[in-house]
Image (cartoon, grey):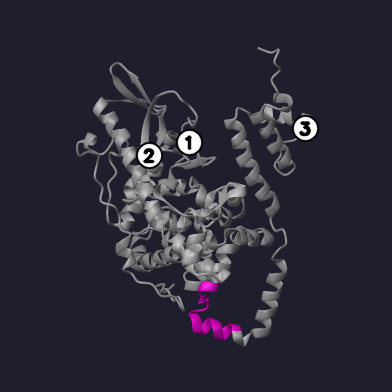
């Protein structure tokens, strides 16, 4: 395959963006005395993207000790500390760290490493700094969404931007809310990315992973802290804090769009390009499709060339020379995906209920992304914009038939999309139930009294789950406490 060139028919962007989102210079907290905390020892930041890619793979391989043990989320043993961000306090649990013999021990499940008090202070201060950087970086990434969304909303509603800005904060007294809450145009502040979080856990999870539960509990492994260190900028933690931002991903709205995609468009497309995410992260599958259609850049085809014997993820199977030749085009592609992603987010949040309805009607949680991209850009997938348009026009009848057939399928329930959405909602409600002290067995037992016999997401009535949770909170129904009972 000849060297890939981004064609991007009608696209315009500046590589100056490459400079704007470069790696953050690493400075350690004072308690670290100029050295990294113990879990980052042996990993370095480098401007060489391929070397960073190889270090990422080394991190995955070496992290089995402290990342593949049994998850300790919700385990309150071990050490803990309180962290404050923008006036909001979060409790950080550190179940791998425990005090003994006048020191602090880091338990991996295989061995224990003794730390001094100073080294343990370095751990807490490093995590505090990492989270703070992520909050600030998330806000910088997303702060332009509000004015862009307001501008788009104003055009759609026949108002001026000033009129919209004046309207949004106004209260709707009879409903105890504001127009901003009704229209769901996010008025973002840095604190929004942390204010809903109550607890954080630095713990194994069974894999190199991180997660958010009920937008109030954030869990991350040492492995993902190392990933962000290698990259030189916050990535994974930014992704999770976007999930925790109720203005961007509040329930029930998030059940009607691909929230993983929307939380990946900014963090996973930073510069310099994280090659691991660019080639392999499944949350970017729809952007890969857009890159092929609008940029004539086929990532799947490139992967086959870069990795001998179809073996992924670096090492001896990687053709380093070929990857070096492609780096400039890869970085251009990442910049474009990030810029276009911001435009998609701004358009979506100008009227998120409409776009959620489009996703729901089409049984495709990525439909909003696809439609907005098609509004913004022209296809180039047949060797450039002109060639692609000429082909479409030359085969106009056939093209129309294909388009009609595709449109006929829109709105049909493909791949059990309805069940997938039900499962999303059910999963969130079940997590809520667990927080309230209702495990699956107990919920199922109580649920039988309400008329359902199976907690299979495909069968359970979500209204029933809501009713049970409401009864539990209000102490009604089977949860009603008799005055005679002490």
Q: Is residue 389 magenta?
A: yes
Q: Residue 213 placed where, x, y %? A: 53, 39
**Which percent across, then down, holds residue 205?**
48, 36
Whether residue 300 is visible here, answered yes or no, is no
Please tell me which residue is depicted at 28% across the width and 30% down the height of the picture.
121
Q: Residue at x 71, y 66 (%)?
A: 409
- 3 or 2: mark nearer the eye: 2
Residue denoted by label 2? 87
The segment highlighted magenta reads 374-392
> What whole-number distance in Å separates the C-alpha atoms at marks 1 and 3?
35 Å
Q: Please say whether residue 452 is visible from this viewpoint.
A: yes
Q: Mark 1 touching mark 3, by CB under 8 A?
A: no
Q: Quadrant of residue 395?
A: bottom right
The mark closer to the camera, 1 or 2, is: 2
Q: Around disc 1, counting alpha carbons within 10 Å, would you say few (fewer than 14), some (14 to 19), or many (20 or more)?
A: many
Label 3, label 2: how far apart the Cα atoms are: 43 Å
- Considering only vertical position in the picture, is 94 above or below 176? above
Disc 3 packing (10 Å; few <14; some 14–19; many ≥20): some
Element at label 1 = loop
Q: Earlier in the sequence, mark 3 or mark 2?
A: 2
**Quarter of the image where one finds residue 223:** top left
Q: Give left or right: position of 327 versus 164.
A: left
* Residue in the picture at 46% in, 46% down: 240
Write down the residue under mark 1: 205
Query: Does the magenta run of residues contain 406?
Result: no
Query: Camera-side residue: 400 or 172?
Result: 172
Q: Residue 188's x, y, as percent?
A: 44, 53
* Residue labelled with disc 3: 450
Mark found first going from the N terminus, 1 or 2? 2
- Residue 267 position within the rendered picture, expressed as x and y whole percent measured from the top left: 42, 54
């Amino acid at each position: 395959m000849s060297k890939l060139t981004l064609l991007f028919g009608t696209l315009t962007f500046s590589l100056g963006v490459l400079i704007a989102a470069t790696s953050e210079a690493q400075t350690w907290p004072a308690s670290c005395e100029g050295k990294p905390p113990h879990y980052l020892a042996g990993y370095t930041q480098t401007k060489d993207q391929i070397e960073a890619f190889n270090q990422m793979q080394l991190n995955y391989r070496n992290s089995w000790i402290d990342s593949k043990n049994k998850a300790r989320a919700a385990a309150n043993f071990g050490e803990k500390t309180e962290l404050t961000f923008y006036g909001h306090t979060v409790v950080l649990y550190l179940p791998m760290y425990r005090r003994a013999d006048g020191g602090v021990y880091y338990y991996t499940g295989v061995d224990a490493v003794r730390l001094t008090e100073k080294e343990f202070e370095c751990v807490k201060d490093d995590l505090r700094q990492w989270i703070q950087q992520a909050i600030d970086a998330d806000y910088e990434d997303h702060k332009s969404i509000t004015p862009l969304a307001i501008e788009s909303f104003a055009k759609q509603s026949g108002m001026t931007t000033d009129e919209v800005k004046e309207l949004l904060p106004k209260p709707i007294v009879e409903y105890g809310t504001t127009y901003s809450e009704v229209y769901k145009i996010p008025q973002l502040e840095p604190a929004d990315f942390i204010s809903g979080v109550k607890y954080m856990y630095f713990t194994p999870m069974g894999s190199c992973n991180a997660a958010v539960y009920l937008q109030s509990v954030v869990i991350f492994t040492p492995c993902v802290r190392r990933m962000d260190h290698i990259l030189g900028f916050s990535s994974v933690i930014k992704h999770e804090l976007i999930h925790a931002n109720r203005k961007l991903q509040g329930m029930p709205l998030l059940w009607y769009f691909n929230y993983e995609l929307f939380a990946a468009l900014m963090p996973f497309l930073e510069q310099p390009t994280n090659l691991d995410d660019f080639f392999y992260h499944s949350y970017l599958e729809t952007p890969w499709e857009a890159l092929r259609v609008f940029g004539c850049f086929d990532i799947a085809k490139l992967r086959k060339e870069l990795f001998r014997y179809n073996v992924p993820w670096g090492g001896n199977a990687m053709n380093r020379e070929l990857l070096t030749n492609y780096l400039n085009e890869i970085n251009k592609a990442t910049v474009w995906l990030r810029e276009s992603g911001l435009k998609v987010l701004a358009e979506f949040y100008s009227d998120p209920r409409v776009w959620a309805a489009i996703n729901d009607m089409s049984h495709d949680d990525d439909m909003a992304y696809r439609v907005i991209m098609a509004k913004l850009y022209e296809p180039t997938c047949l060797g450039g914009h002109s060639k692609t348009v000429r082909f479409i026009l030359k085969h106009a009848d056939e093209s129309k038939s294909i388009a009609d057939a595709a449109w006929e399928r829109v709105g049909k329930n493909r791949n059990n999309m309805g069940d997938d959405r039900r499962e999303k909602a059910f999963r969130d409600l079940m997590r809520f139930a667990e927080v309230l002290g209702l495990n699956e067995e107990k919920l199922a037992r109580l649920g039988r009294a309400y008329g359902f016999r199976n907690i299979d997401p495909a069968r359970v009535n979500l209204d029933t789950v809501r009713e049970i949770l409401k009864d539990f909170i209000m102490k009604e129904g089977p949860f009603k406490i008799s005055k005679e009972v002490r």
